[in-house]
Amino acid sequence: PQSKLVISWGTNPYYTNIHQIPLIKEAKKNGALHVVINPDKIKSVEMADLFIQPTPGSDAALALGVMNVIINESLYDSDFVENHTEGFAALSERVQEHSPEKVEAITGVDEETIRKFAVIYADSKPSFITLAKSMDFQDRCFDDSAIDIINSALGIDSSYLQGITLERLRNDGVTRLNMPGEFHMPYKDLKFYTPSGKIEFYSEKMKRDGYNPLPAHIFIEEGPLTSPDLCKKHPIYLLTPLAKSFLNSNFANIGNPGSEEEKPILELNSLDAGRRGVKTGDKVRVFNERGECTLWASVGDYLKEGVAINKSIWWNNLSPGGCNSNQTTPDRLADMGGGSTYNTNLVQIEKLNDPV
């Protein structure tokens, strides 16, 4: 609530972090701005002061374009950079490759919006950014129930937890930790857990591990520049973000009459739908060389042309033809951390003549 700027970048708090919504609203009442960055026009856009809708897979380019403006227009705290960061000169050189004009061509976000966002971010202190993360956790600890996790946390010997019990949490709901001051600000002491003890724009450890030591935009495997022939054949980016009433595939077997998860839906842009003769309610075939599935179309203008969404994830045996959108997704691993690349997924769409 103390933040002057709240940025929801690639995350959908109404679906995945509902507890943040009252805090964002409180911050806005206190004068904060809220920026939403997402390929989908999510519900949070309703309370956003600025909505930025980049092409899937172009987030790093957008970030570098913002850095370009901040650095070239000297919108940063030079004393802080001098005393508490490493590699700023190398970063300054890197961002020259990502002018707002070039970034517009990559992201589909116009140059004026990039500059506007950069100025807002540079001028708003303190700010808070929520970033999405997509990981496949397999550790046994993730089998613990909510009560198991709460009891484990309460068992920690800490003055912050004195007097906080499971019974009190059940009775009072949200309970503040016994912490001094009004709120906790990370890194307030300017101590950073890096080899240099500073914020590292250039990381020698990343270089040793075989990665680019500087922030970089890497074009995704399936796209117009990296695979133009594939893009002509399968020109639609299929994204599979979380559904409101599901937890990944959990609860997909529980009926939700009247909700958006009543049946498996493909959301697509009206221009893409028009070229294919598709209207809302039509059954469509979604396919590529990896596989295919059948979904019901929902047509609108809130998605960019060339982007479609199937909120995840319906079970195969609850999907038409016994196949869900996972049949189309790649099994490539991300270059860093070995995560999934489910949303780097080009498909084609065609109308089916089957009765709905």
Image (tube, rainbow, N blue to C red):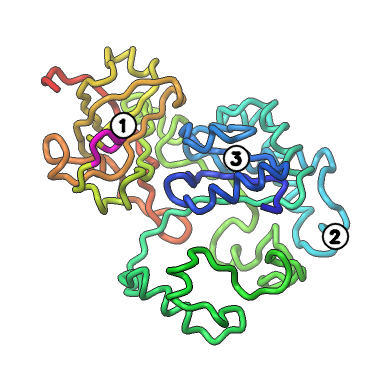
Q: Secondary structure at mark 3?
A: helix
Q: Secondary structure at mark 1?
A: strand
Label 2 environment density (alpha carbons within 10 Å; few <14, some 14–19, many ≥20): few
Residue 345 coordinates in the image, percent (x, y):
35, 38
Q: Relative to residue 49, is residue 260 drawn left or right?
A: left
Span highlighted in magenta in the image: 256-261
Task: Please give the residue where the numbered disc 1 appears in the rendered image.
Answer: 347
Q: Nearer the viewer, residue 59 or 217?
A: 59
Tell me the amino acid under the disc marked 2. Glu
Q: Name the residue located 38 percent from the left edge and 32 percent from the top edge.
A: 237
Tell me the amino acid under the disc marked 1. Val
Quarter occupied by residue 80: bottom right
- Position of the C terminus by quadrant: top left
Distance between mark 3 and mark 2 Cα atoms:
25 Å
Tell me the amino acid under the disc marked 3. Ala
Q: Nearer the viewer, residue 143 or 59?
A: 143
Q: Relative to residue 268, is residue 13 drawn left or right?
A: right
Compared with 115, 149 (above or below) is below
Distance between mark 1 and mark 2 Cα atoms:
47 Å
Q: Relative to residue 56, is residue 106 drawn left or right?
A: right
Task: Please give the residue where the numbered disc 2 appears in the rendered image.
Answer: 82
Compared with 188, 273 (above or below) is above
Q: Secondary structure at mark 2?
A: helix
